[in-house]
């Protein structure tokens, strides 16, 4: 008895459901005057206050313009003055379901009922506000309903969310036709699954122009009072560390990379300092050249004086001889 009791306890919900259906069937047959079984085409002509069960092929205003056979359940308001009708229809030889509500003498368009048998078909489309899906959301080629390789997939695995495109020609394209903006609000990796910056690229980048925003641009090198590094100290630093002061060493660059903005500032600072060294050297050379010119003029004057002295000495000697 105990196994039978356990079986009946386990099947309790099923027994209650079957009992309810049997009771409903009994009540329906007891009120048979409100049920009509009609093997005819059903449109808006539904007996008042009845549930009509019908079928037919080529019905006027059949779901989706089909001429196939359809089952139809039709419910109409009990008041003859109200043409409020709800109809549910299903295919004979397919799995499509449809329903419509008619509130006047004009039939309303049919609405498709989506389910597991037709939701995955690429031949149907629908519009929905929110969709919750436990699986992969896949969109195929909108211009070729038989294509299997041109698609985009959207799914998640508990750790990451994925958007994958499989295109035979142009690959995966993201574009905005309205606001001309595509906003990504977190770190992005290209060629890497572990981005360390807002954009990490494991590969080459080709661009016509790259604009880097930075601050503290080293124009302060040209301010009065800026102290240029001593060249002797710079020479000693280079001999010891094998790179310029303030410039990262090769080991650090290979490990951490370089910041374009910061590196440009460092290089510009070195160029500006080098320019000041050249200006200082130019001024020193110019001073030396000016001194050389003065010295050359002095030497020339001395030569002219010596020549004149020689001439005068020779003239005096001649005068004494005469």
Image: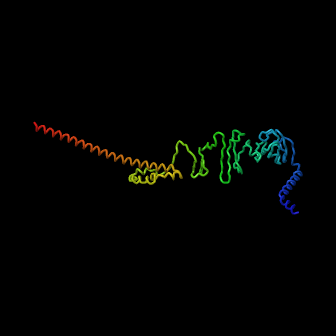
- Say whether residue 59 is left or right of residue 319: right
Location of the N terminus (image quadrant)? bottom right
Taking the view exactly as shown, the residue that stands out farthest to the front is 321
* Label tally: 0
Residue 262: % across, % down: 49, 51
- Any part of residue 251 in sight: yes
Residue 163: % across, % down: 65, 47
Residue 297: % across, % down: 26, 42
Which residue is more in the foreground, 77 or 41? 41
Residue at the spot 74% in from the left edge and 45% down from the top edge: 120
Height in image: 244 above or below 69?
Answer: below
Residue at the spot 28% in from the left edge and 43% down from the top edge: 293
Taking the view exactly as shown, the residue that stands out farthest to the top is 322
Location of the C terminus (image quadrant)? top left
- Any part of residue 44 in sight: no
Residue at the spot 57% in from the left edge and 46% down from the top edge: 203
Residue 239: % across, % down: 43, 53
- Say whether residue 270 is left or right of residue 180: left
- For the rendered model, the colour scheme is rainbow
Taking the view exactly as shown, the residue that stands out farthest to the bottom is 2
Which residue is more in the foreground, 69 or 101? 69
């Amino acid at each position: 008895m105990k196994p039978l009791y356990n079986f009946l306890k386990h099947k309790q919900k099923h027994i209650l459901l079957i009992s309810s259906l049997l009771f409903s069937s009994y009540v329906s047959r007891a009120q048979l005057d409100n049920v009509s079984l009609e093997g005819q085409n059903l449109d808006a002509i539904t007996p008042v206050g009845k549930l009509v069960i019908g079928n037919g092929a080529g019905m006027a205003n059949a779901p989706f313009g089909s001429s196939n056979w359809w089952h139809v359940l039709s419910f109409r308001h009990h008041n003859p003055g109200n043409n409020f009708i709800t109809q549910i229809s299903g295919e004979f030889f397919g799995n499509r379901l449809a329903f419509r509500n008619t509130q006047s003498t004009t039939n309303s368009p049919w609405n498709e009922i989506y389910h597991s048998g037709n939701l995955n078909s690429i031949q149907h489309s629908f519009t929905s506000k929110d969709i919750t899906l436990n699986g992969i959301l896949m969109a195929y080629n909108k211009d070729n309903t038989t294509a299997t390789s041109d698609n985009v997939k959207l799914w998640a695995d508990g750790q990451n969310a994925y958007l994958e495109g499989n295109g035979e020609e142009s690959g995966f394209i993201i574009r905005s036709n309205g606001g001309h903006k595509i906003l990504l609000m977190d770190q992005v990796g290209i060629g890497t699954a572990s981005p360390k910056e807002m954009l990490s690229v494991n590969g080459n980048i080709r661009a016509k122009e790259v604009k880097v925003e930075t601050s503290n641009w080293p124009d302060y090198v040209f301010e009065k009072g800026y102290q240029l590094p001593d060249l002797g100290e710079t020479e000693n630093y280079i001999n010891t560390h094998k790179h310029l002061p303030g410039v990262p060493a090769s080991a650090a660059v290979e490990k951490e990379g370089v910041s374009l903005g910061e590196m440009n500032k460092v290089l510009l600072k070195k160029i500006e300092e080098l320019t000041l060294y050249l200006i200082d050297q130019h001024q020193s050379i110019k001073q030396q050249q000016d001194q050389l010119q003065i010295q050359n003029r002095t030497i020339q004057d001395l030569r002219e004086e010596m020549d004149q002295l020689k001439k005068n000495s020779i003239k005096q000697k001649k005068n004494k001889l005469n």
